Image (spheres, rainbow, N blue to C red):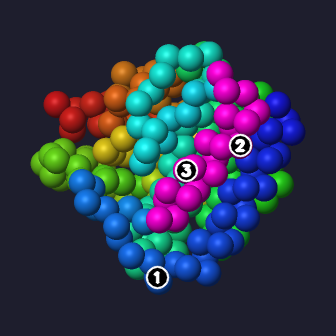
C-alpha cells in the first residue's frame, strides 16, 4: 500500500504544479453546479485511474463524476480541487485532497496546496506531516478559531449565532479550501474549527490529519467515524474542541 500512497502523492503534487500555472486562466464550465473546471475532471479521472489500476475492487468517491458512496472495504474519498472558486479566480489556497478509507475509517490522507507548495499527509498511527516534517495541534489555546461556512450554506442564522457565541474569541473567516483550513488547525496555526459544509469529501482527509496531529475532529454527533451525508464538523486541540462542540450543537438547533 505504501507504493500506492507514494504514487498518489506524486500525482497530486505534479497535478498541483500544473494547476498553479493555469490558475486564473481557466473557465467555469459548470452547468448544474457553479465552480467546475476541466482541471477538476482531469484530476478526478487521474486519481481514479491510479486506484482502479491498483485494485478494481477499491471504490472511488469524489465530488464531480463519482459522487455515489459505495459501502466497500476500501473506499477513496477525493476532492479534486477543494476551493475551485479560488483556482478560477487565480487566488491562493485551493488544494487537491484525497483519503483512503478502510471499513469507513480513514487510514491515509494527503492535501496539497499548489499556491504555496505545501503538502500535508497523515497515516493512521504514524502522525501528521507538512512537507515531510511532523506537525501538531497548538498546545496553548488562544481561542483562535476558524468559522468556515460553505458558500452555499442554507441557514445564515446558524452562522450568526456561532459568531455571537464566539465573540470573545479571535475568529477567522475565509473562502480558502476547507481542507487547508483543517490542515492549518493540525499544524497549530489555529486552535479550532467549526465547519458548515455542502459535502464531506475533504473532511475525511482533514479529519485524519487533525487527529494524527494530536487533535480531535468529529461530526455534530461527536463521532470521528463521519458519514458522507454529514454537513457540520468540529475540530481542534482538546480545549478548543470541547469548547466548540456544545456551541455548534446549540447554534445548529
According to the picture, the residue beneath numbered tag 2 turns out to be 50
Element assignment for label 2 = helix
Give the spatial CA distance, label 3 vs label 2: 10 Å
* Residue 206 visible in the picture: no
Near mark 3 (Cα within 10 A), the count class, few <14, some 14-19 or many ≥20, is: many
Residue that appears at 16% across and 47% down = 154
Q: Please say if 145 is above or below 115.
A: above
Q: What stretch is highlighted in magenta?
A: 38-57
Find residue 217 and report its horizontal and vertical position in percent: 51, 34
The one nearer the camera, 244 or 74, is 74
Find residue 172 and report its horizontal and vertical position in percent: 40, 63
Find residue 231 and report its horizontal and vertical position in percent: 33, 36
The one nearer the camera, 15 or 117, is 15
Q: Which disc, if any, is residue 44? A: 3
Residue that appears at 47% across and 83% down = 25
Residue that appears at 73% across and 55% down = 11
Give the spatial CA distance, label 1 vs label 2: 28 Å
Q: Which disc, if any, is residue 24? A: 1
Give the spatial CA distance, label 1 vs label 3: 20 Å
Q: Please say if 43 is above or below 25.
A: above
The one nearer the camera, 134 or 42, is 42
Nearer the viewer's eye, disc 1 or disc 3? 3
Check residue 47 for magenta coloring.
Answer: yes
Element assignment for label 3 = helix
Near mark 2 (Cα within 10 A), the count class, few <14, some 14-19 or many ≥20, is: some
Residue that appears at 85% across and 36% down = 2
Amino acid at each position: 500500500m505504501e507504493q500506492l500512497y507514494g504514487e498518489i502523492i506524486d500525482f497530486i503534487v505534479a497535478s498541483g504544479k500544473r494547476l498553479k500555472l493555469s490558475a486564473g486562466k481557466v473557465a467555469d464550465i459548470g452547468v448544474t453546479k457553479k465552480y467546475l473546471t476541466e482541471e477538476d475532471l482531469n484530476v478526478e479521472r487521474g486519481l481514479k485511474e491510479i486506484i482502479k489500476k491498483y485494485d478494481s475492487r477499491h471504490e472511488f468517491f469524489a465530488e464531480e463524476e463519482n459522487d455515489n458512496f459505495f459501502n466497500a472495504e476500501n473506499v477513496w474519498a477525493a476532492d479534486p480541487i477543494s476551493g475551485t472558486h479560488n483556482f478560477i479566480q487565480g487566488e491562493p489556497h485551493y488544494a487537491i485532497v484525497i483519503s483512503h478509507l478502510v471499513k469507513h475509517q480513514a487510514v491515509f490522507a494527503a492535501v496539497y496546496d499548489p499556491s504555496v507548495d505545501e503538502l500535508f499527509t497523515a497515516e493512521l498511527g504514524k502522525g501528521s506531516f507538512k512537507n515531510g516534517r511532523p506537525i501538531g495541534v497548538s498546545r496553548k489555546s488562544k481561542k483562535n478559531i476558524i468559522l468556515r461556512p460553505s458558500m452555499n450554506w442554507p441557514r445564515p442564522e446558524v452562522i450568526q449565532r456561532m459568531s455571537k457565541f464566539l465573540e470573545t474569541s479571535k475568529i477567522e473567516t475565509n473562502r480558502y479550501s476547507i481542507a487547508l483550513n483543517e490542515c492549518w488547525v493540525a499544524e497549530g496555526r489555529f486552535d479550532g474549527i467549526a465547519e458548515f459544509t455542502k459535502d464531506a469529501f475533504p473532511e475525511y482527509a482533514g479529519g485524519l490529519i487533525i487527529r494524527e496531529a494530536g487533535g480531535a475532529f468529529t461530526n455534530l454527533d461527536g463521532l470521528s467515524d463521519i458519514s458522507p451525508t454529514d454537513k457540520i464538523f468540529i475540530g481542534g486541540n482538546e480545549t478548543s474542541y470541547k469548547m466548540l462542540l456544545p456551541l455548534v450543537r446549540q447554534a445548529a438547533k
